[in-house]
């Protein structure tokens, strides 16, 4: 059985189901390949991948599946003040983090040469590696990059948090547009207005984007099962992108502690926070989020860098009060811990009238 939509056809996949990319090292080749093999689109979040590793990563993905997959990057790699590590900034912000370094028995971190890889270098490496699909967030790549994708046959997928962003992606000629609502786990990937002013829900955003842009729309945010996929298609989306539901599966790259928490009552309480990276993201409220409220936090990616060692030590010490626990608002309905079983259910729940 296949299930055709224009979105699925453009992506070269059999079913309009996308496993959303996970940045920050939480994607795996295994998960992306399983989803692609099952007829959906597996994605790999590569925004923390070094440019020199992009070719090997793409090779690992194409060795693992014969079907299309997406590599995902963050177009904007820093917020104002977040590009160059400097001592003055360290002096200003370290006092916020020092009590946690002490509590976890860590010594103060040493400033790196850079906090984040440069998008310009990553995209150059990605174009050389030629993945079947390039998806991106936090902006629109320049005209030359989009033209080069077209020339190389790389399908482009951009993400919007508002109608204005969807229209800007459409005007730039991006092939498909993810309409990502505020329900979604992970970041609000806004790029035209501050994330706090771009809080559109998936239900509205999908409908208005589908009515106002030419490119097929992909619904993201709050979809965890077949009913959600069908709802997205009814609202005008050509495919649904699921993040949290795949993050909960054993094949994802997150920790067992995080995965287990996704199946507890604590997922009922998610919130938007800048405490993970300096950019607004949705996760389960815990002590870290509460403690960071009202603090003078550094910009992205400086906040991620200060928090990185804290998260790693907390995980080693079996503590979830100082972890980033990304989760979307529909997490209380999660059922599956296996990507195979999740994909089987999503596919069998597709509307049969349109199955070909
Ligand atoms: C832990 C985590 C990390 C994510 N990282 C990225 C990323 O790097 N790039 C991206 O395009 N989307 C990212 N997302 C968004 C997902 O791909 C997806 O669009 C979103 O999770 C859909 O909402 P849902 O969680 O309600 O299913 C991330 C989501 C989560 C939960």
Image (cartoon, rainbow, N blue to C red):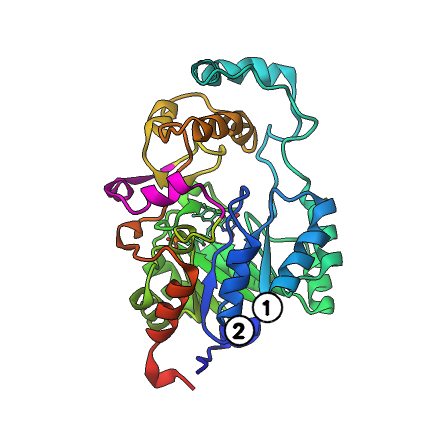
The picture quadrant where one finds residue 271 is: top left
Magenta-tinted stretch: 253-272
Q: Position of residue 334 (x, y in %)?
A: 30, 54
**Towards the viewer: 96 or 249:** 249
Q: Position of residue 310 (x, y in %)?
A: 48, 25
Ligand 1 lies under 8 Å from the Cβ of mark 2: no
> Can residue 215 be seen in this snapshot?
no
Work out whether mark 2 precedes mark 1 in sequence or the reverse, and give the earlier one: 2
Q: Position of residue 337 (x, y in %)?
A: 37, 55
Ligand 1 lies under 8 Å from the Cβ of mark 1: no
- Relative placement, left or right, of 231 versus 150 is left
Q: Which mark is residue 253?
A: none
The picture quadrant where one finds residue 211 is: bottom left
The picture quadrant where one finds residue 176 is: bottom right
Please state, as top left, top right, bottom left or bottom right, where the C terminus lies in the image.
bottom left
Judge whether residue 321 is colored magenta: no
Q: Position of residue 282 (x, y in %)?
A: 38, 42
Q: Which mark is residue 68?
A: 1
**Towards the viewer: 146 or 328:** 328
Please state, as top left, top right, bottom left or bottom right, where the N terminus lies in the image.
bottom left
Q: Residues within 10 Å of mark 2 (few under 14, many from 20)?
A: many
Q: Residue, x 45% and y 21% (percent of image)?
A: 296
Whether label 2 touches label 1, CB < 8 Å: yes
SS class, disc 2: loop
Q: CA distance from mark 2 to mark 1?
A: 7 Å
The residue under label 2 is: 13
Q: Residue, x 42% and y 40% (percent of image)?
A: 281
Instruction: Name above or below for residue 296 compared with residue 27.
Output: above
Judge whether residue 271 is colored magenta: yes
Instruction: Name above or below for residue 61 compared with residue 11.
Output: above
Q: Residues within 10 Å of mark 1 (few under 14, many from 20)?
A: many
């Amino acid at each position: 059985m296949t299930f055709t939509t224009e979105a699925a056809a453009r992506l070269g996949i059999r079913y309009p189901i996308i496993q959303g990319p996970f940045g920050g090292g939480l994607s795996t080749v295994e998960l992306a390949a399983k989803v692609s093999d099952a007829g959906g689109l597996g994605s790999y979040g590569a925004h923390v991948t070094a440019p020199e590793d992009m070719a090997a990563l793409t090779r690992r993905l194409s060795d693992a599946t014969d079907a299309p997959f997406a590599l995902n990057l963050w177009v904007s790699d820093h917020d104002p003040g977040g590009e160059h590590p400097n001592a003055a900034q360290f002096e200003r912000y370290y006092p916020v983090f020092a009590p946690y370094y002490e509590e976890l028995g860590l010594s103060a971190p040493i400033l790196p040469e850079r906090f984040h890889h440069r998008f310009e270098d990553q995209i150059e490496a990605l174009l050389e590696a030629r993945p079947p699909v390039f998806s991106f967030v936090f902006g629109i790549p320049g005209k030359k990059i989009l033209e080069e994708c077209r020339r190389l046959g790389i399908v482009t997928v951009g993400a919007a948090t508002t109608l204005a962003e969807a229209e800007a992606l459409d005007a730039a000629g991006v092939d498909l547009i993810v309409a990502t609502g505020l329900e979604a786990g992970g970041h609000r990937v806004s790029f035209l207005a501050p994330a706090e002013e771009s809080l559109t829900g998936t239900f509205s955003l999908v409908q208005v984007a589908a009515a106002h842009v030419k490119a097929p729309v992909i619904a993201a945010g709050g979809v965890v099962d077949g009913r959600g996929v069908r709802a997205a298609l009814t609202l005008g989306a050509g495919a649904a992108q699921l993040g949290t539901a795949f993050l909960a599966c054993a094949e994802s790259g997150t920790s067992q502690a995080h995965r287990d928490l996704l199946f507890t009552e604590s997922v009922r309480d998610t919130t938007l926070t800048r405490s993970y990276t300096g950019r607004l993201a949705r996760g389960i409220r815990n002590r870290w989020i509460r403690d960071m409220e009202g603090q003078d936090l550094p910009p992205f990616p400086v906040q991620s860098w200060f928090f990185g060692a804290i998260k790693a030590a907390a995980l080693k010490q079996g503590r979830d009060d100082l972890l980033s626990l990304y989760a979307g608002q529909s997490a209380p309905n999660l059922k599956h811990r296996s990507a195979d079983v999740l994909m089987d259910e999503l596919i069998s729940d597709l509307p049969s009238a349109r199955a070909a």
